């Protein structure tokens, strides 16, 4: 059996960082990262980006050495991804914040509104309903992070947690301030509008959860396998016939329902910004599906059936 020699160069300076002798041909990039880590302890595997070209894409950890377009002396390029943090930690942090922050405004703790309103409650039942819906949404997200989601990547750059928390925590405070404000006025069409909004919100929350379960079942524990998602016996998953990322479709629907329920401008703005961001993610995933699977259903749109 022939063995490989592997040299790892700095992607920026082209300086040689490491030379590995007698590497097994069936060694994976993940194993090569571990070998590299032994000679450079400051760069743990999750922090490493190993590439065939200095400006190329990162190789996957499961890529096998002998299946790559390299000779018996393989040259790879290393780029430092910076300090990393687990996806689970990021999600738990960015979702716990809005849950707690919203409740601080709901209970009207001191220093938020004028002193005479400290620890008072709103006379409008929609305010209490909105708090229950908002709390339910983020408790659901936390539980899904712990028990449902299976992440294809274990970590993300540490700097992202500050950006993500600013987004989620900031919007939660902005929304909560106005919804729980003593001068808040209920929706113009009253109870009928609120009930319709609640139905939309709950329907989309169930749909979003159903999609997450379907996606979880596509990937065995500990695997990074990607498959084409198809509808299951659950009717909420039938939207897969028309959309590549229905979890985002249902998420958008949930926030549209919450906007209708509260008739609050900050909520509408949060929904719009979220829709723009989810559209970017959905288009990216849709392109990946089309590139990876030749038999991918041609009728599907990224996020909105027949539209977008």
Image: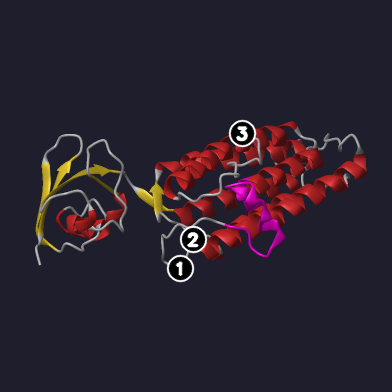
Which residue is labeled 2 in the image? 150
Q: Nearer the viewer, mark 1 or mark 3?
A: 1
Q: How many angstroms separate mark 1 from mark 3 (CA)?
A: 33 Å
Callout 1 touching callout 2 (CB < 8 Å): yes
Out of 99 and 285, give the one closest to the viewer. Answer: 285
Q: Nearer the viewer, mark 3 or mark 2?
A: 2
Q: Which residue is mark 3?
A: 273
Q: Which mark is residue 221?
A: 1
Q: Position of residue 284 (x, y in %)?
A: 49, 40
Q: Is residue 69 left or right of residue 20?
A: right
Is residue 103 shown left or right of residue 40?
Answer: right
| Residue 143 on image: x %, y % | 60, 62
Q: Disc 1 or 3, which lies upstream in sequence?
A: 1
Mark 3, Cα crowd under 10 Å, few <14 / some 14-19 / many 20+, is few
How packed is label 2: few (under 14 Cα within 10 Å), some, or many (20 or more)?
Answer: many
- Of the 4 image quadrants, the one containing the N terminus is bottom left
Label 3 and label 2: CA atoms lie apart by: 26 Å
Q: Which residues are magenta?
A: 230-248
Q: How many marks?
A: 3
Judge left or right: residue 154 versus residue 69: right
- The quadrant in which residue 25 appears is bottom left
On whether residue 63 falls in the magenta region, the answer is no
Image location of residue 242, percent across then percent down: 64, 47
Q: Are marks 1 and 3 in contact (CB under 8 Å)?
A: no
Question: Relative to 122, is 142 above or below?
Answer: below
Q: Is residue 53 visible?
A: yes
Find the distance from the CA under tag 1 to the CA under tag 2: 7 Å
């Amino acid at each position: 059996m022939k063995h490989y020699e592997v040299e790892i160069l700095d992607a920026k300076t082209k300086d040689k960082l490491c030379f590995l002798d007698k590497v097994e041909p069936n060694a994976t990039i993940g194993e090569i990262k571990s070998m590299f880590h032994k000679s450079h302890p400051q760069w743990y595997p999750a922090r490493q980006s190993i590439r065939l070209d200095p400006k190329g894409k990162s190789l996957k950890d499961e890529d096998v050495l002998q299946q790559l377009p390299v000779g018996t002396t393989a040259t790879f390029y290393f780029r430092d991804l910076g300090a990393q943090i687990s996806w689970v930690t990021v999600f738990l942090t960015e979702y716990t914040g809005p849950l707690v922050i919203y409740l601080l405004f709901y209970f009207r703790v001191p220093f938020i509104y004028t002193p005479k309103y400290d620890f008072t409650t709103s006379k409008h039942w929609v305010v209490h309903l909105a708090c229950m819906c908002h709390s339910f949404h983020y408790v659901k997200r936390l539980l899904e992070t712990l028990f449902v989601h299976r992440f294809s990547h274990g970590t993300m750059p540490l700097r992202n947690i500050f950006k993500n928390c600013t987004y989620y925590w900031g919007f939660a405070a902005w929304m909560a301030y106005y919804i729980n404000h003593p001068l808040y006025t209920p929706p113009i069409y009253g109870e009928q509008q609120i009930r319709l909004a609640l139905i939309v919100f709950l329907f989309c929350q169930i749909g979003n959860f159903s999609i997450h379960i379907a996606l979880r079942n596509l990937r065995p524990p500990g695997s990074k396998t990607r498959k084409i998602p198809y509808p299951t016996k659950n009717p909420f998953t039938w939207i897969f016939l028309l959309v590549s990322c229905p979890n985002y479709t249902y998420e958008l629907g949930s926030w549209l329902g919450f906007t209708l329920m509260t008739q609050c401008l900050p909520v509408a703005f949060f929904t719009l910004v979220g829709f723009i961001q989810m559209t970017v993610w959905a288009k990216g995933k849709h392109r990946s599906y089309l590139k990876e699977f030749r038999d991918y259903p041609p009728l599907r749109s990224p996020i909105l059936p027949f539209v977008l």
